[in-house]
Image (spheres, rainbow, N blue to C red):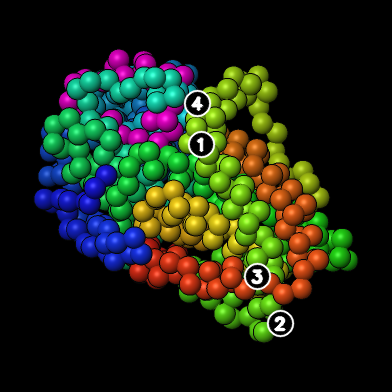
Amino acid sequence: MAALTSQIFPVRSVDLPGGAETIVPGGRHLFPLLPAALAGVRRIGVLGWGPQGRAQALNLRDSLTGSQIPVTVGLRPGSASAHAARAEGFRTDDGTLGDWLSVAASSDLVITLVSDAALAAHHRELFAALRPGTTLGLSHGFLVGHLRQSGADFPDGISVVAVCPKGMGDSLRRLYVQGAQVNGAGINSSVAVHRDHDGRAVERALAWSVGLGAPYTFGTTLDNEYRSDIVGERAVLLGAVHGLVESLYQRFRLAGDDPHTAYERSCENVTGPIARTISADGLAAVRDRLDPAGRHIFDRAYTATYQPALDLIAEIYDEVDSGNELRSVVLAAQRLAKRPMAPISGSPMWAAGPAVRARRAERDLPVEPFTAGAFLAMLTAQVDLLAERGHPWSEIVNESVIEAVDSLLPYMHARDVAYMVDNCSVTARLGARKWGPRFQAACDQIAFPDFDGSGDPDGQLVEAFRKNPVHDALARLAPLRPPVDISI
């Protein structure tokens, strides 16, 4: 979408490398404005009770307390989630819990948060239930890509918007609850208006984002969002992290480390000191705080890993852009109905995690320069690829950096990477399983042998990292992140 505008919420301009972008700052002081922004909405329907469905329904219900706009949860017949929704206060007797199609038919803002595969399979039923004038809300652009690939479109007479929190549902809810103690709340969100049928779509989308507690909301398009989101899941947010730490663990074990030390130098380092340094002080600080010897190792690992990572992320982007990756998710749903995904936590390294986490209080773990160089090479490669493909810098920074270090990596630090990959959305789990081994192979077969055989790092790549526009973009956007830390 173009620059964000609003007659109700404050709008701020932020100077970024690609030019000024407009954002909407959030905060609980804006909750009284929600009814005005939701003018004409008599009911909000939230379809689905996965991590995002639960978090968004609860956040919106809490934010609209005292208004005349109820939030109703819609579930598919026989849903195993009905008991959990009732336990959170959504009930059939007061009309706040019901069949998903009935809820869709009776709501003016319908937020669909069922799985991507289920939505692809059942979107015709949903579309048939929507009344003219309804605003259909998405938190993922997957359906847009699926409709385009199948030659279909949204029905006439409705608006289509998206609000996409840059973090998982558990973080969205936990941070919102923490925000009650300070004037901050949920997770940063992107907002897109795909179709504005009646001139109300922008304000409704912004109200949805503010109601979720987004510290700030930035504009994008649904085309950009689903590309960057699905690419990010398969790359630096999940797939690349999993492949990298598995490869690093095996490398350190072969070099003679015991399992606990190898885990600390690989997984624990990425999710702990490296992530915390980026979150607090930016990407460059990871390199700058190393001693000269450590910086040399960082530079060699960075320059050995950058090009293989960039090539692989470009392949992922093309697979998403072409529709191949979306089709693979739809096809997988048919297999998963008979054969659920097995966990990926069976490799030996994950057995070391509990003991490492148990002894954290005894150790102040330093940044491992080799691990840091390889991880930042992958992260920067994703940043550069998205910039090359024309994504706005606010989206690039949120999707590649802030979501990682403020949401996913802290969760992985508490549980481990394998747990995260085994407990995220089906679309993300499929992507991490498909592409994680590719990143592991790129490390084992290309990046790490190059490191072992090279002398000096590629000075041009190091200089490109030092001068990358992402540092300025992150510095400008970092103050607008959540004002409280996520509890796990």
Assess disc 3: are there few (<14), some (14-19) or many (≥20) residues with their C-alpha within 10 Å of its C-alpha: some
Residue tagged by mark 3? 458
Residue tagged by mark 2? 293
Work out whether residue 310 or residue 348 is closer to the camera in this orientation and state it: 310
Mark 4 or 1, closer to the camera? 1
- Marked residue nearer the N-terminal end (4 or 3): 4
Real-space Cα separation, disc 4 to disc 3, in angstroms: 43 Å
Assess disc 2: are there few (<14), some (14-19) or many (≥20) residues with their C-alpha within 10 Å of its C-alpha: few
Work out whether residue 94 or residue 49 is closer to the camera in this orientation and state it: 49
Residue tagged by mark 1? 320
Instruction: Choose top left, top right, bottom left or bottom right for residue 12.
Output: bottom left
Task: Tell me which segment is drawn in magenta.
Answer: 121-146
Mark 2 belongs to which amino acid? Ala
In the rendered view, tell whether residue 102 sits above or below residue 364: above
Instruction: Choose top left, top right, bottom left or bottom right for residue 361.
Output: bottom right
- Marked residue nearer the N-terminal end (2 or 1): 2
Contact (Cβ within 8 Å) of mark 2 with mark 4? no
Real-space Cα separation, disc 3 to disc 2, in angstroms: 16 Å
Contact (Cβ within 8 Å) of mark 3 with mark 2? no
In the rendered view, tell whether residue 368 sits above or below residue 433: below
Real-space Cα separation, disc 2 to disc 4, in angstroms: 49 Å
Residue tagged by mark 4? 117
As drawn, is 450 to the left or to the right of 136? right
Marking on residue 478: none
- Marked residue nearer the N-terminal end (2 or 4): 4
Mark 3 belongs to which amino acid? Asp
Total marks shown come to: 4
User: Callout 2: helix, strand or loop?
Assistant: helix
